[in-house]
Amino acid sequence: MELSQTSWLLAILAALAVGMSKGGLSMVGTMAVPMMALTMSPVVAAGIMLPIYVVSDIGGLIAFRRSFDRRVLMTLLPGAMAGIGLGWATAHLVNDDVVMLIVGLIGLAFALNALIRRDAGVARAPDPVAGNFWGGVAGYTSFVSHSGAPPYQVYAQPLRMSSTLYAGTTTVFFAIVNAVKLIPYAALGQLNPSNLKVSAMLILPAVLGGWLGLKLLRIIPQDLFYKLITWALLLVSIRLIWSSVAALTGA
């Protein structure tokens, strides 16, 4: 695959974002596919980034191998598997412009939710009904654009787990989801040699992103950093929505 200089720059930034998300700045990873979709097919972008996520998950699994909530995972994972299956079953029904629109809408919804959300003060208990619903949405959006974090957070944040337990549960959940996605991605031809070659070149930026994420946690106030990322995601998402609507309507 021949990428333009702009595409390579965005791909490197996307890999850095994935690494930073595994280094403690979890929301940053949501930027990866929307950024790359500015200059390439979002389907191709998702195929390139999946191996990056899987490799990055390994370090997280090692770090949090004893710090996760099995009850929460059991309320999420059945729905997540169904969501991945739905994404696989309907993949042939949507073209690149529709996928770009979905990616933009997911990013827009997440950015707006992050900007206006107010955390509740009372912790909720894990609920299989709510967990499977939001797990299903997370599985589907993760399949489409590796953007499963927003619906996952809608369910998981009100549980008010400790920071370590939350990080570990999140890591294990998405490590399982990403590993399962390898099967349909391979069946759909998204893990072809051309995409994998680009993925291999992006491993190093992802590793550097993990180190950078840990450093930024100590330097930049987390609230300020998240606000900057949220506004950036908002602008990128609006651009994707505009482009996809224009392409779909022939404007």
Image (spheres, rainbow, N blue to C red):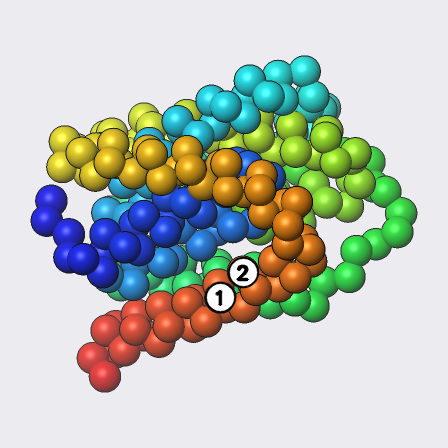
Tag 1 near tag 2, CB within 8 Å: yes
Residue neighbourhood size for the residue with mark 1, other residues' Cα within 10 Å, grouped as few (<14), some (14–19), many (≥20): some
Which quadrant of the figure has residue 227? bottom right
Left or right: where 89 falls relative to 176? left
Quick check: 60 above or below 42?
above
Nearer to the camera, 144 or 161: 161
Which residue lies under the disc numbered 1?
232
Helix, strand or loop at mark 1: helix
Helix, strand or loop at mark 2: helix
Which residue lies under the disc numbered 2?
229
Report x, y in % for residue 226: 61, 57
Quarter containing the C terminus? bottom left
Q: Name the residue at 69% across, 68% down.
A: 116
Report x, y in % for residue 205: 36, 40
- Identity, as a three-letter code, of the amino acid under mark 1: Ala
- Identity, as a three-letter code, of the amino acid under mark 2: Ile
Distance, label 1 to label 2, CA atoms, is 5 Å
Q: Name the residue at 79% across, 34% down.
A: 162
Could you tell me how many numbered marks the image carries?
2
Quarter containing the N terminus? top left
Could you tell me if residue 168 is visible in this image?
yes
In the picture as drawn, the residue positioned furthest to the bottom comes out as 251
Nearer to the camera, 76 or 169: 169
Quick check: 218 above or below 165?
below
In the picture as drawn, the residue positioned furthest to the right comes out as 122
